Amino acid sequence: MTEPLVRAHGVRKSYGSTEVLKGVDLTVDEGQVVCLLGPSGAGKSTFLRCVNHLETIDAGRIWVAGHPVGFVLKGGKLHELPEREVATQRRDIGMVFQRFNLFPHRTAMENVTEGPIQVLGRKPAEARREALELLTRVGLGDRGGAYPRELSGGQQQRVAIARALAMKPKVMLFDEPTSALDPELVGEVLDVMVALARDGMTMIVVTHEVGFAREVADHVAFMVDGAVVESGSAREVLDNPQHQRTRQFLAKVL
Amino acid sequence: MASEDLQVVPIRHWGRWVVGALILGLLALLGIALADAQILYEDVPGFFTHEIMLGGLVNTVILAVCAQAGAIVLGVVLALLRRSPNPVARWFAWGYIWLFRGLPVLLQILLWFNLALVFKFISIPVPFTDAFVLHEPTNVIITAFVAALLGLGLNESAYMAEIVRAGLNSVDPGQIEAAKAIGMTPGKTFRRVVLPQAMRVIIPPTGNNFINMLKGTSMASVIGFLELIHAANRISSGNLEIMETLIAAALWYLIVVSVANVGQYYLERAYGKGVR
Ligand SMILES: Nc1ncnc2c1ncn2[C@@H]1O[C@H](COP(=O)(O)OP(=O)(O)OP(=O)(O)O)[C@@H](O)[C@H]1O
Ligand SMILES: [Mg+2]
């Protein structure tokens, strides 16, 4: 029995007086794909952002690849890490955003090589070669010279996936990667994600694409009002939901 | 209906012709007046390339570039202080901007130039010893150049702080998150992601300010710094051709400002990559 790659335990987070996460538990084993479903405002994005410490949690613990995110264990105590060292932890955690967030002043190729060259200190020629492989893998091998504004939303999101993969992360976080896309562009991004899952990447995916969850998720967690109310295999949660809120939600999106 | 067969009669803009003719007429009158004026145009080229004038030109450009460069660096620091979570830093930056933007530049130049009246020495002691890193009479350190540099540069830094702050605020917070997500440190994030994008907003007003700075160096003539105006005055004090020397100086200002405009165009193009 190996240690799970991501283990969240009792995660709480408040903005001012409103508690957005009310004790979230989630474990993700290596190679697993976990889909997080739930209505708007449930705290899915907030939870995902806690996993790579874009948000600081108020209580509970998140471990990724054996390290408590944002902290270091020393002498039986958890010491908060300075931002520079959190940055080092984040190398293992790739993230793909709803609105792509590509660097607009850099080409697709430069977006992908930015992390390897600037963060990992890789040689530019080597980084470009690997970037080309990644761009080819997401079907954009010929668009490396294009600036983000010259690409469609679906293409931008695929570049963003390649940019995250270039860091060779242990886990990839996706926050509604297709919800800002025109319906006809959703498929091309989901195809890339399905292929990634098949290759054994560990993934946490916040999505409303129930079809995608059914196809690739090893595990589905349903979140409402800052807590996971139901979780299990895709078939259990999607085909035979126990919780009333899950049923209501699925009735709406299906 | 075969409307494409019908002839199109464009509207006639009679007003434009009238206004155009009026402007050309006024310009012609001005030309006649200037040709008739008691200006020894043939002497202007000589003053234009006069040794003192060229010295003034070099000093003007050096002063403007140094003051602007220092102001940009200080402006970035001040902008970061104003955005800092530390209230003392925010308060300090606000006070700095309030002071150095609020006082006339000429007054600031005069204050710096006369610093020796209140402080005889400028010293930086080595802590816990009797030694000094620096210990010099104030009037040795505060030359006319240094006084002008401080007066112009510190005032400008207050303006730059606001320009840089607006630029930083214009960058989408999602960009910072994307940079963090690939493991960039805060320093790298600022230099590689935030600043290059803020530059698009920062450069146009900075170019504007630099042109003002080039002209503002003329105030240093008051404390005897040999910039273009002072050079013109020095040349004309011997021959009394005041207008002719000033015209030569004016030509240099126009040339330097034009060069700055061209430089700004290329900077904007470089930082506009991927956007326009
Ligand atoms: N920076 C913030 N400051 C204050 N409140 C916030 C902030 N970010 C999120 N919230 C609140 O936290 C709650 C959860 O937000 P979150 O974005 O995590 O929901 P979500 O499940 O991702 O919803 P959606 O499906 O709409 O993306 C919401 O009520 C939101 O208003
Ligand atoms: Mg969300």
Image (cartoon, grey):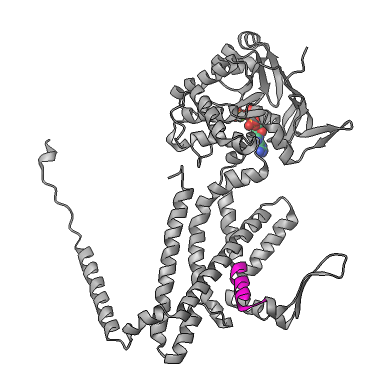
| Closer-to-camera residue (B228/A14) | B228
Q: Quick check: B27 above or below B173?
A: below
In the image: residue B265, left or right of residue B132: left
What is the span of residues highlighted in magenta in the rendered image? B142-155
| Closer-to-camera residue (B257/A218) | B257
Q: Quick check: A119 above or below B64?
A: above
Is residue B109 visible in the rendered image? The answer is yes
Q: Quadrant of the N terminus of chain B?
A: top left
In the image: residue A19, left or right of residue B8: right
What is the x, y in percent for residue A146? 44, 35
Q: Which quarter of the frame holds ligand 1?
A: top right
Q: Quadrant of residue B68?
A: bottom right
What is the x, y in percent for residue B200? 50, 51
Look at the image and say whether residue B264 sits in the magenta stretch. no
Is residue A16 visible in the rendered image? The answer is no
Q: Residue furthest right?
A: A75
What is the x, y in percent for residue B202? 53, 55
**Chief secondary structure of the magenta portion:** helix
In the image: residue A141, left or right of residue B32: right
Point 25% across, 81% down: residue: B32
Q: Quadrant of the C terminus of chain B?
A: top left
What is the x, y in percent for residue B102? 61, 70
| Closer-to-camera residue (B110/B62) | B62
Look at the image and say whether residue B149 sits in the magenta stretch. yes
